[in-house]
Image (spheres, rainbow, N blue to C red):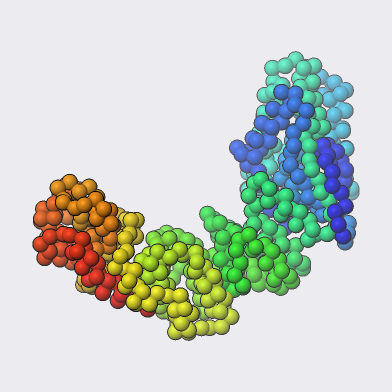
Amino acid sequence: MSIKKFNFYSVGQFLISDKFYIPDYQREYSWEEDEQVKDFWMDLEDLVENQRDSHFFGQIVVHDDQEDRKKYIIDGQQRSSTSIIYLAVIRDLFEKIYTETKKDGARNKVEDIRLKIIGRWSEEENELQFHLGKVDHVFFRDFIQRGLPVNDDVTEASHKRIKQAYEFLYQELSDKIANLNDDDKYNKLVDYYTGFKDRFNLMCVETDDMNEAFIIFETLNARGKELETSDLLKNHLFKTAGNLIDDVKNQWLKMQRNAEGIDLTKFIRTIWNSKFDFTREKELYKNLKAVITTPKECLEFTDVLVNSIGVYKVLVDPNNEAYFEDKHIEKHLENLKLLNASTYYPVLIAMANSSYSEMEIRNVMEAIESFIVRNCVIAGKVANRYELLFAKLAKKISAQHMSFSEIVQELKSEMLSDDEFENHFLICTIKKAPVAKFILRRINDYSQKETLINPSNKDIHLEHIMPKKLGTWKVHEDLHQKYLHRIGNLTLLADEYNTAIKNKGFDEKKKTYKKSAIVMTSKLCTSNEWTPTRIEERQKELFLMAKEVWKF
């Protein structure tokens, strides 16, 4: 088993060299009129009008399946399909010229395209050179390859794209020849026919080993446009699914429909890290391919993907998605989203897929929020360093129903102790306003349980007590820079917020603070002055409450 062929061909040479098939597991026709099809036309127009020698159209990877006795295009489906669409346009325009002029050359070109390149089809015989997958096969055969009329009410999305590609290319080419006399019209069309057929070039690699075909596909795509790992994963699942291919494909499509707006590769990696050994994105395809090796495993994994998409969507967008009945869970998710935390995702996925109660999930999310606040927000540790910790924990949760105390014990191995938390908190600065408002609001709500601050950051204003611009404040610049963003120098204002006070002296500011319904702000009025020493003292006071809010 090895590479059987490796060569450069013109599009015409490639299309007549054999019969080619698109596997059913490959995605449907996806080139959009305003993007890839337009780019295709512009490249062709440039080649013909500027009389360029050649244009490199891309690569084709072919699997010569010895069992099926068919040659499957593993990579290059879209450009191959578009080539046939374009040649169908050329065929139909030559047919039109022949009808109008009876020019023998036009008739000959029609027959060349129909017999040698596209092929013929009837109920008794199938001589087509190119066969799309299940979803597009019949529509493509009848509308493009046979040239039959089609209704305007096409509903399948890929069929619409095929129709739009044909109509776009037909219109562009018609416009090119519209104002020419009969001979020039024919000659221009010949230029656009032979230019594409003979001077659009492809690199073709053919192998009889399916795994090798996918490795070649992966390697070629890794150069240039970023490889869509999710497509590789889908291809592996589909080709391994065997007699369960229909079930696996249906589950994949169901997941894909429900995952609108979601990065599928990140989603699949998160699900993987919730059940299996931790993997980074660049190793995901290799590791999945090594573990998922039977049709049953393919179906089980796609089932997990379908069952996980709902909870994953609320992780990614907790403000606009709903999943849990317990709104305290989603509040913790909103908090973690605000703190830009995502490495914990596999833990929640594992719990949601392992029949944990919402109360258990709520308790774990509260613990994770404390972990993130202590270690990442206050201590400044990079969140990504805990990705492996959360993935290992998720795998254990998936394998065995761990208790809350067991989960917490796992987290404690890297959690800041109270003493460490205090040491970091007392010197902590927070420059991101949303994060600072969140920390202060949570502390204030702890001390003011009967009147909680409006949870929307938009309606709460962050106040630097010692202001960003000193104005009349008598503070050395070094001390100003050191203490400006300290937690102890920050507070919150609600409706009483007034931009006019932000650079005023402390005594003037206190008149506004006194009106505030926010306890931590009105309490500032008990201070006679605002100095670095007072900022440090207040930071200690805030820590005593923070330790209780994010206790562990």
Residue 354 versus residue 463: which sits nearer the camera? 463
| Residue 210, position as x, y percentages in the image | 80, 59
| Residue 151, position as x, y percentages in the image | 67, 41
| Residue 438, position as x, y percentages in the image | 32, 63
Task: Tell me if residue 243 can be seen.
Answer: yes
Left or right side of 239 for 544: left
Question: Eyeballing the image, is 153 above or below 424?
Answer: above
Left or right side of 55 for 307: left
Q: Residue at x 65, y 63 (%)?
A: 283
Left or right side of 363 for 401: right
Residue 515 sits in which quadrant?
Answer: bottom left
Residue 376 versus residue 139: which sits nearer the camera? 376
Image quadrant containing the N terminus: bottom right
Q: Residue at x 61, y 39 (%)?
A: 35
Image quadrant containing the C terminus: bottom left
Q: Residue at x 56, y 83 (%)?
A: 400
| Residue 352, position as x, y percentages in the image | 51, 74
Q: Residue at x 49, y 72 (%)?
A: 348
Task: Tell me if residue 318 can be seen.
Answer: no
Residue 505 versus residue 45: which sits nearer the camera? 505
Residue 293 sits in which quadrant?
Answer: bottom right
Q: How many marks?
A: 0
Residue 278 sits in which quadrant?
Answer: bottom right
